[in-house]
Image: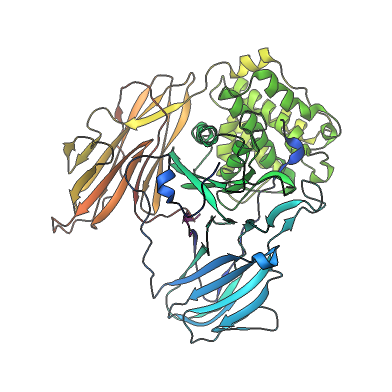
Amino acid sequence: MSSWRAAAVAMIMVVSLLTVPIAAGSAAPATPATPVGAATPPATTAGVDDTAISTTAGVDDTPTPTPLSTHNELRLTTTLNRTPERVGEITATVTAEIPSQFRELTLQLPAEARLVSTSGFTQTADGNVEWDSNSNPATLTYRIDAAVRSAADQPGAEGTYRFVDTANWSLVRIPSVGDISGRIVGDDPEIIRETEIDGPGVAGDQIAYLGPYDRRTQTAHGQTFHLVVPEAANLEAEPSEIFGSVTAASDRLRIGDRDDEVLMIAAPTGEIEWAVRGIQTGDSDFWVRADESVDTPANNWVHEYVHTRQEYTTAEDARWVTEATATYYAALLTLEGDRIEFDRFQRFLAQGEDDPQASAVMTDPDSWENFANYRKGALVAGDLDRRIRLATDGEASLDTLMRAINSHEGELTAADIAGYIEAIADEAVAEETTAATTATAVDPMWSRDSHTAAFGAEPARFAFRFADDTPISVDGTSRPLPESGENLTVGVNETVSVAVTVENVGGTVGDYELPFRIGDDTTTRTGRLAPGETTTHRFAQRFTEPGSYRIAVGGEELSITVTENTTTDAPIDIPTEIEVPGFGIGGAVIAVMLVGLRYSRRS
């Protein structure tokens, strides 16, 4: 995955290795969008200082840009520009900073791109561009249609918009160059892709908004959420409610790794007929219609967030899982957040009983009618969750299955899913699920009493906090926690040790995940605790370079300044863990990360 930051000019960085010969693929496809038909029922101008409207407190967490390496990075910066005189299209200028290893370089233009000008590149007969092996940097500029309309086989009325350019703003897929090929001598370079906006706007790794906007930011559970509210949008839900809904989902979903950054764009409504209620694409970018509520079982802010936590590739007979689980979790987490009552949750899932979707076969996408993978799929997914909980006395749930699916290597099939269910619950539940996903009928929505029997006991829920006893030490000497916003100063080659207590504040035994981040690396500690039980993990890191670093614990933020006051040539300690008995009181669920000023995400 990649890192990005958004301001008046925003960028995204994706890193992958080049080999000899080199080739890099094009962008990942979008996650299928949420249909309009599945729904139940003032911003400042751009150019403002984003940090001034951040909802987080404490030290400045703006990352320092990584210095450009002149010998091992092919840096491709795409600058997007609106063309008001040409409504419906945008202009992209690609600047290639080319390291010395390259002897030849060819870039593939996006489909239907219209080349406007080049400097250091020449267009080939097949429509690509070749570098002249001399100019550095080299540039090319092209225009491309920004509108993406729904096709006949996609959710939404055919011809309605998935992405669009208007006279005043644009919500677009980033039109990056595709395959990269060439000839190099020496070390394999990295490919670094960045996106900048000429004028007000913000870019993620796959989606960009061009136009005046207001941005709100909130950090929770090891993730930083950015909510972009265009000047042209009338937001239905308060930003605080949107943040509350998605950050609760971030905490509640223990199904695998979380992205460091999440970009959420409120799509303006009124003048545009959107094909869908929202689209998630790339690692963690999504847009949702600005008129969407969070107090509905079809909570699309949560639905699209769930997609950012799905990290698997499916075969055709397992495709239903993606939208089914996102739809189900959106309803369940909204119910658990006391935003809806059980009867609304029940009626929403009961849509799966209606024709024609009820007769669709989940393992056969050709049979899906009326958003069957959303509607019938959500009912099947929910019933599977209920059965797993009953079969394991609440010790496992759909979360357990999703963790297994997210860890699956290769293409996920229906047989793989059945195997995981059998291992997690039992053979009977696996057979029942196989029958439910291959049948032309569906079991009815369960009753309130059945829901209480399976979901009644509060599931395992974990609070992470600095340990009460010696949470921070430097080279074995205890240090008090600095006040919010104050620095902890240490010397080069000193070791900072951080102790984190985990407590199960829920009602059943369960598994937890504790993320620990240092620079480019992420380490996740896991464990299992009974209700009320605690344990403590201690992580240690020796800092060998001066600079500024950040420790974040939930809403608290502390900074570390490393100064040149020692000359010991000690090696870097590998992050370690010591588990000791713990104690303490329950608190807000929080996550811990230790991050240098260089942002990086999994690739």
Q: Is residue 140 visible?
A: yes
Q: Nearer the viewer, residue 499 or 195?
A: 195
Q: Nearer the viewer, residue 268 or 66?
A: 268
Q: Is residue 109 visible?
A: no
Answer whether residue 334 is magenta in the image: no
Q: Is residue 75 left or right of residue 577?
A: right
Q: Is residue 164 left or right of residue 237?
A: right
Residue 372 location, quadrant: top right
Which residue is most to the top? 449
In the image, residue 123 sits, relative to residue 252, either above or below, namely below
Question: Could you say where residue 558 lies in the image, as x and y percent from the top left?
Answer: 29, 41
The residue located at (72%, 34%) in the rendering is 39
Main secondary-structure element of the magenta-colored stretch = loop
Q: How many marks?
A: 0
Question: Could you say where residue 365 lies in the image, as x and y percent from the top left?
Answer: 79, 45
The region drawn magenta spans 1-9
Describe the colour scheme in one phrase: rainbow
Question: Could you say where residue 40 lies in the image, as x and y percent from the top left?
Answer: 72, 31
The residue located at (58%, 31%) in the rendering is 424
Q: Is residue 444 left or right of residue 137?
A: right
Answer whether residue 6 is magenta in the image: yes
Q: Is residue 382 left or right of residue 459?
A: right
Residue 499 location, quadrant: top left
Question: Could you say where residue 514 lies in the image, as x and y percent from the top left?
Answer: 41, 37
